[in-house]
Image (tube, coloured by chain):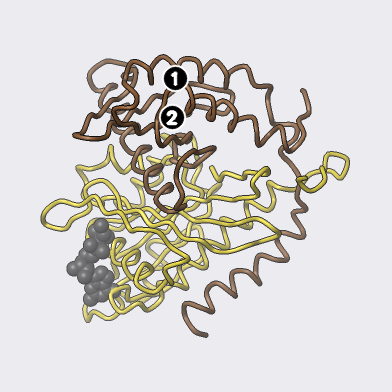
Chain colours: A brown, B yellow
Amino acid sequence: MERLEFKQIQDAFDEPLRDFVRESGVGLAVLINRSGQVLAQHGFDKVFDLVGVASLAAGINASSRALANQLGEEQFEHLHHAGRARQLFLGHFDSAAGQLMLVAVFDDRSSIGLVRLFFEQFVGGIRRLPSMDASRKTVSAAEFEAELETSLDKFFHDLIGG
Amino acid sequence: MSLVNYATREITCKIVYYGPGRSGKTTNLQYIHSRVPWDRKGEMVSLATEADRTLFFDFLPLELGQISGFRTRFQLYTVPGQVYYNATRRLVLQGADGVVFVADSQRPQLDGNIESLRNLHENLLEHGIDIRDIPVVIQYNKRDLPNVFSVEQLEEELNFRNVPSHPASALLGEGVFDTLRSASEGVLKKLARKLEVPAADTMGEPG
Ligand SMILES: Nc1nc2c(ncn2[C@@H]2O[C@H](COP(=O)(O)OP(=O)(O)O)[C@@H](O)[C@H]2O)c(=O)[nH]1
Ligand SMILES: [Mg+2]
């Protein structure tokens, strides 16, 4: 399996996402897995807004999938919600890292047609990435465990005050 | 499945509060939300019916701080407890790294606790997870109420695997953080074991 340097890992998801954002003209984009965990993002400047959007989008994806199953479909292709000023696109695809989902928010500087077009391209880009498993490990478990107690103590001390 | 991003040095873990309807899952999250300083938490999202019952889930992101140079984040979820919401419950359980089972200590609720625990086993199995493989802690909630079983009796009835357990009165905030701490520790210890790698495979710090 091909080894990747850190910089390459970081770029692995970031670069296709950046291309997608530039070409499709969306304002916000976030790549998440099925549990709503964030793999890459563009345009969010508050981390908790990002996490909120990601978890709700994962919820929509999961319930849409369950609904599809009940209706005898495997999964609906993508979801599109249009509001007055903003529109939301949720597109899912399978990858080496399991099913992933791209959530994009756009206004009239883009369109659903453009978003779909460049989504296809984005998916292709992600699928061409070499597997990243070999380079994932980088931390000493012992060190992590040793720090764990102290960190938890600190966090909960602040909250409970004792 | 916890997500470790070695590039940005972030860890994200998902903890699901499970249990029968009205056992106090949402109350746990509300208390946590009320006590954690603003720079350590996000919005609490509640997808509830008009009657204030959890419809889909409650969600609360928390920031624990740095561990071994990793920015560590928790996502707390609750499930709707009512029996007929099983499909939603199963969805929320997807990708969970740890479970807090919130039991209602009141005597008449024993069957509901047992049924919900059984349902947890089933739903985990649907996701291919054996309950022995995921950190679970039990909270015996509503200790402030009069008609409750003793903790020993509840241990006997519900805690056959001898997982960590904590008495609580979530409405008053008692035991809420003990429970969360215990669950966090279980989840992160398990994660630490997964981080272990032979030295040859270890890479340097990011540039
Ligand atoms: N007396 C008492 N009431 C509680 C406690 N925890 C929760 N409740 C109440 O039980 C009801 C159901 O709580 P909720 O958190 O919505 O339950 P959920 O269905 O598990 O999310 C609410 O009226 C809460 O105020 C507790 O520790 N003591
Ligand atoms: Mg609730």
Rendered residue at 68%/25% (across/down): A131
Real-space CA distance between mark 1 and mark 2, rounded to the nearest whole angstrom: 8 Å
Residue that extends furthest to the left in the rendered view of this protein: B50
Drawn side of residue A137 relative to residue B199, left or right? left
Which comes sooner in the sequence, label 1 or label 2? 2
Q: Quadrant of the C terminus of chain B?
A: top right
Residue that extends furthest to the front in the rendered view of this protein: A109
Q: Residues within 10 Å of mark 2 (few under 14, many from 20)?
A: many
Quadrant of the rendered image holding ligand 2 = bottom left
Marks 1 and 2 in Cβ contact (< 8 Å): yes
Rendered residue at 47%/41% (across/down): B95
Please name the amino acid that badge 2 sits on. Answer: Leu
Residue that extends furthest to the right in the rendered view of this protein: B200
- Relative image position of residue A43 (x, y in whole percent): 46, 41
Depth check, front residue: B46 or B86: B46
- Relative image position of residue A57 (x, y in whole percent): 35, 38
Q: Residues within 10 Å of mark 1 (few under 14, many from 20)?
A: many
Q: Count all numbered tags in the image, as a single digit.
A: 2
Q: Do labels 1 and 2 share a chain?
A: yes
Depth check, front residue: A22 or B90: A22
Rendered residue at 29%/66% (across/down): B27
- Relative image position of residue B116 (x, y in whole percent): 31, 51
Please name the amino acid that badge 1 sits on. Answer: Phe
Callout 1: SS: helix
Q: Can residue B106 be seen in this view?
A: no
Q: Can residue A64 be seen in this view?
A: yes
- Relative image position of residue A23 (x, y in whole percent): 47, 21
The disc label shown at residue A119, or none: 1
Rendered residue at 31%/50% (across/down): B79
The disc label shown at residue B119, or none: none
| Relative vertical location of residue B127 with respect to residue A19 in this rendering, above or below | below
Callout 2: SS: strand
